[in-house]
């Protein structure tokens, strides 16, 4: 993938300080992650702070019975692919690529130094934390207060076209329903269209 890293930071994160953009670009790496590759392993610290250029990731963990539970999806251009709020903390989920993916990545040790020296980066970091926290509570609220149909309809709105790109077992797990329930909802939706 051909990308101008400086333009990425200027456009996506609206960093206008040329010196800061240059510092970020100088430590940025472009990464290709193959389908089914693990980007971050649960229990291990992240070594890179990465942002999506293309592709789909999912975060998952194993519950007490060893079942694979999908916690999140990440696919929007420029979205951070992160598994923790604090960069020093071990990951609370495993992040795996569901498709071939391209990333803009910064080594965690470099980004930590830059964040503490730059009010602009600290503000972006805080904004990302707030946005992540808001999203977390939105999802929790949807999953625990809505019917299966409402959760499915919300997923279709919030995660456009993922229903056609992601294994339905992962989507059902994310929406806290069985694959059979998801299949019934999809069938009912297709029937309603005719």
Image (cartoon, grey):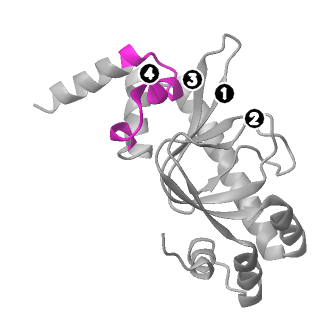
Q: Residue at x 44, y 24 (%)?
A: 169
* Eye-nearest disc, 1 or 4: 1
Asked if the residue under mark 3 is in contact with the one under mark 1, i.e. CB atoms within 8 Å, the reply is no
User: Residue at coordinates 37% horizontally, 34% vertically from top-left?
Assistant: 153
- Mark 4–mark 3 Cα distance, whole angstroms, equals 8 Å
Query: In terms of secondary structure, where does tag 3 sit?
Result: helix
Question: Residue 144 got which mark?
Answer: 3
Q: Which residue is mark 2?
A: 92
Q: 54 above or below 145? A: below
Mark 3 residue crowding within 10 angstroms, few (<14) / some (14–19) / many (20+)? few
CA separation, marks 1 and 4? 24 Å
Mark 2 touches mark 1? (CB < 8 Å): yes
Please determine whether, in this image, residue 6 is positioned above or below residue 113.
below
Q: Secondary structure at mark 1?
A: strand
Residue under numbered circle 4: 147
179 left or right of 11 in image: left
Q: Residues within 10 Å of mark 2 (few under 14, many from 20)?
A: some
């Amino acid at each position: 993938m051909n990308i101008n890293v400086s333009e990425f930071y200027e456009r996506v994160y609206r960093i206008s300080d040329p010196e800061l953009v240059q510092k970020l670009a100088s430590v940025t790496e472009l990464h290709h992650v193959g389908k089914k590759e693990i980007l971050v392993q649960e229990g291990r610290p992240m070594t890179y702070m990465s942002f999506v250029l293309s592709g789909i990731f999912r975060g998952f963990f194993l519950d007490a019975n060893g079942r694979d539970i999908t916690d999140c999806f990440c696919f929007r251009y420029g979205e951070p692919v992160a598994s923790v709020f604090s960069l020093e903390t071990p990951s609370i989920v495993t992040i795996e690529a569901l498709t071939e993916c391209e990333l803009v990545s910064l080594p965690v040790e470099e980004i930590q130094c830059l964040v503490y020296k730059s009010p602009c980066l600290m503000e972006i970091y805080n904004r990302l934390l707030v946005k992540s926290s808001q999203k977390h509570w939105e999802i929790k609220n949807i999953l625990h207060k809505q019917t299966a149909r409402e959760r499915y309809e919300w997923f279709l709105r919030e995660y456009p076209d993922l229903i056609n790109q992601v294994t339905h077992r992962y989507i059902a797990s994310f929406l806290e329903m069985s694959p059979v329930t998801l299949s019934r909802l999809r069938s009912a939706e297709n029937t309603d269209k005719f």
